[in-house]
Image (tube, grey):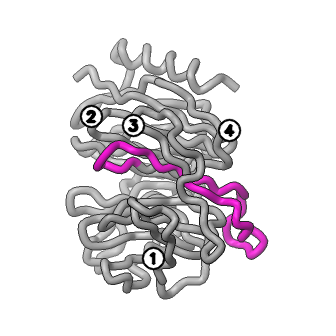
């Protein structure tokens, strides 16, 4: 298998020659910056927009939904803006409340919210050791990704998205088979599914009344994990089962390959201010740092 860097260089050269697909909005490409090592099954990279700090959740054990996986070994690392490792175990649990296998994260109302196996947890950004459980009614299955808008935290569970408000109350929001990643953007809500035969992007009704609307791109992907959205409406997704990163233009039709040869790219994060993308490699224990480029 080719290395991510060598393949990416070839892709970037092709994009510079006009080979990347067009579409509404800008045509984006990725330039590899660095590979940050030393993680233990990194699942999610989430960038704090306030200061550019990157939080990286580490599952440690691959399984999620079994009692045996509650091993107290999970942790969340932090990277300085640009990707240099800042602290490997910024969040690592306490005797009172363990951290087992954190995955999706988001920032909401001064807290870092993160899914930890079968619970949603949070800690104040200024005091990461002060961890508490946020009850989510309606499920006893494992949670995966998390996304936030101005009023709610959304978490994905088994075939459903759940929603919690500022008071910590809520429950099931919408059913969606195979749902994995979720992202709020400019008053709208989107999700991706990892169901291998029907992996697609969906727009969700923020009111929770209308059913999810698929983009109709399922044949193009093997199994999507993470979703991010750029300011111009371009979607960035990681196809974890296909070992690739793609962009989908704001027209929701134009799909462009940005990187391949990755070993299970998981939930990516974007530093919009600095134009950086962070992609955890689940089985290589690295976070790949890329710079967003556009020739438009």
Span of residues in magenta: 47-76
SS for dot 3: loop
Q: Relative to the observer, which residue lies in front, 77 or 43?
A: 77
Give the label on residue 175, or none. 1
Name the side, left or right, on which 74 lies relative to 178.
Answer: right
- Quarter of the figure with the N terminus: top right
Distance from disc 2 to disc 4, alpha carbons, whole Å, reads 33 Å
User: Which circle's residue, 4 or 3, is located before the other in the chain?
Assistant: 3
Find residue 208 and report its horizontal and vertical position in percent.
Answer: 31, 78
Q: Residue at x 39, y 60 (%)?
A: 126
Give the mark nearer the N terminus: 2 vs 1.
Answer: 2
User: 140 or 94: nearer the eye?
Assistant: 94
Q: Which residue lies under the disc numbered 2?
A: 23
Circles 1 and 3, Cβ within 8 Å, touching? The answer is no
Q: Nearer the viewer, mark 4 or mark 1?
A: 4
Q: For mark 3, what is the residue?
A: 81
Q: Nearer the viewer, residue 134 or 187?
A: 134
State the CA–CA distance, disc 4 to disc 3: 22 Å
Q: CA distance from mark 3 to mark 2?
A: 30 Å
Which is closer to the viewer, label 3 or label 2?
3
The percent position of residue 186, horizontal first and vertical second, equals 21, 57
Q: Residue at x 46, y 79 (%)?
A: 134
Please give the label number shown on residue 83: none
Q: Main secondary structure of the magenta part?
A: loop
Q: Residues within 10 Å of mark 2 (few under 14, many from 20)?
A: some
**Sequence-first tag of 4 and 1:** 1
Residue 193 percent across, percent down from the top left = 50, 59
Distance Cα–Cα, label 2 vs label 1 = 31 Å
Residue 33 horizontal/vertical position (percent):
47, 24
Does 58 sit left or right of 269 as displayed? right
Vertical placement of 209 versus 22: above or below? below
- Disc 4: which residue: 284
């Amino acid at each position: 298998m080719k290395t991510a860097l060598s393949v990416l260089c070839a892709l970037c050269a092709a994009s510079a020659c006009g080979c990347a697909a067009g579409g509404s909005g800008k045509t984006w490409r990725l330039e590899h910056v660095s590979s940050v090592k030393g993680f233990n099954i990194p699942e999610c990279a989430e960038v704090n927009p306030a200061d550019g700090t990157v939080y990286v959740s580490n599952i440690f054990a691959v399984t999620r939904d079994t009692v045996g996986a509650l091993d107290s070994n999970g942790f969340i690392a932090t990277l300085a803006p640009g990707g240099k490792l800042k602290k490997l175990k910024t969040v690592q649990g306490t005797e009172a409340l363990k951290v087992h296998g954190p995955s999706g994260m988001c920032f909401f109302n001064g807290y870092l919210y993160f899914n930890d196996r079968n619970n949603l947890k949070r800690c104040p950004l200024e005091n990461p050791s002060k961890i508490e459980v946020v009850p989510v009614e309606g499920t006893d299955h494992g949670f995966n990704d998390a996304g936030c808008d101005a009023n709610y935290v959304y978490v994905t569970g088994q075939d459903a998205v759940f929603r919690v408000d500022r008071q910590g109350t809520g429950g099931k929001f919408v059913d969606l088979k195979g749902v994995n990643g979720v992202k709020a953007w400019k008053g709208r809500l989107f999700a991706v599914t990892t169901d291998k035969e029907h992996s697609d992007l969906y727009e969700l009704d923020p009111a929770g009344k209308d059913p999810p609307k698929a983009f109709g791109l399922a044949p193009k992907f093997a199994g999507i994990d993470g979703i991010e959205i750029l300011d111009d409406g371009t979607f960035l997704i990681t196809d974890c089962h296909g070992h690739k990163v793609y962009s989908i233009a704001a027209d929701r039709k134009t799909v462009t390959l940005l990187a391949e040869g990755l070993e299970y790219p998981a939930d990516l994060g974007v530093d919009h201010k600095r134009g950086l993308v962070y992609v955890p490699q689940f089985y290589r224990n690295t976070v790949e740092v890329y710079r967003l480029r556009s020739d438009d």
